[in-house]
Amino acid sequence: MDPLPPFHDDLDAALAEVWRLLVEGPRFRRNAFHMPALATVDAQGHPQVRTVVLRHADPVAGALRFHCDRRSDKASEIAASGHAALHGYDSAAKIQIRASGPATLHGDDALADAAWAGSMAMSRVCYGADPAPGARLPAGDAYTLPDPETALTLGRPNFCAVVVTLARLEFLYLDRRGHRRAAWVRADGWRGVWLAP
Ligand SMILES: Cc1cc2nc3c(=O)[nH]c(=O)nc-3n(C[C@H](O)[C@H](O)[C@H](O)COP(=O)(O)O)c2cc1C
């Protein structure tokens, strides 16, 4: 049987492992935290969840960034509630991460400019889609996408980066010899606490 990982009974090591996985996420397409689920609350107070690509994880600021269309429901929901949560599960590592906190939309600032500049051409094209995401279509193909050149100008106004400044991080590690669940809260100076799994 494999030895237990160093973070099994060590809160600091567990938090370091959480951030290691989150930081790796944006870099590797096949990483479980490359495409976490994003949860928001809609205008009716109902939960909404969908996949996004994690673009950056900053352990120092305790923040996660993804990108979306300003015209999308998720952008409106984040603007209205000011909050978001992200979730991922790495089935190889057997680690689930839940992260949540205040979320801000960046459309016109330096952060958004840098994020847009760092985006791939094929990603930019999506932001020039007409009509807007979520619009009802008379047929499945009744929408247009600009060519990559046009997308540079047409897509930019619709692009925004979303930064979730984490208030809480939680991990669950599954092991037959004993599951481990822990949470860290910014308001407590990121002091960790074990939770019953
Ligand atoms: C693999 C995958 C990656 C995705 N990445 C993003 C993303 O980074 N940003 C985004 O806004 N939507 C992304 N989407 C699409 C969303 O999951 C969602 O379908 C769409 O944005 C509409 O969501 P909304 O109406 O709740 O805003 C992705 C979908 C998949 C399947």
Image: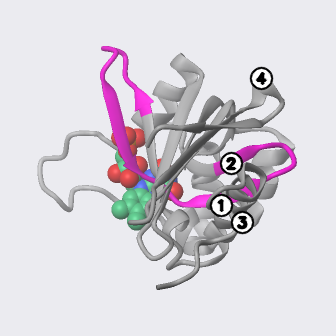
Sequence-wise, the earlier of marks 2 and 3 is 3
Q: Secondary structure at mark 3?
A: helix
Front-most of residues 148 and 61: 61
Amino acid type, label 2: Leu
Sequence-wise, the earlier of marks 4 and 3 is 3
Contact, CB < 8 Å: mark 1 with mark 4?
no
Q: Is mark 4 within 8 Å of ligand 1?
A: no
Q: Is residue 171 above or below residue 169?
A: below
Q: Is mark 2 within 8 Å of ligand 1?
A: no
User: What is the magenta range?
Assistant: 40-65
Q: Does the magenta portion include 7?
A: no
Q: According to the image, label 2 marks what residue?
A: 64
The CA span between labels 4 and 3 is 22 Å
Sequence-wise, the earlier of marks 1 and 2 is 1
Q: Secondary structure at mark 2?
A: strand
The CA span between labels 1 and 4 is 21 Å
Q: Which residue is pictured at 54% across the width and 63% down the height?
A: 33
Q: According to the image, label 3 marks what residue?
A: 20
Contact, CB < 8 Å: mark 3 with mark 1?
yes
Graded by Cα atoms within 10 Å as few (under 14), some (14 to 19) or many (20 or more), the crowding at tag 3 reads: few
Q: According to the image, label 1 marks what residue?
A: 22
**Which disc, if any, is residue 6?**
none
Front: mark 4 or 2: 4
Measuring from the top left, give residue 50's x and y in whole percent: 37, 47
Q: Which residue is pictured at 66% across the width and 57% down the height?
A: 18
Front-most of residues 90 and 47: 90
Residue extending furthest top?
44
Front: mark 1 or 4: 4
Quadrant hosting residue 55: bottom right
Q: According to the image, label 4 marks what residue?
A: 187
Sequence-wise, the earlier of marks 1 and 4 is 1
Q: Does the magenta portion include 56?
A: yes
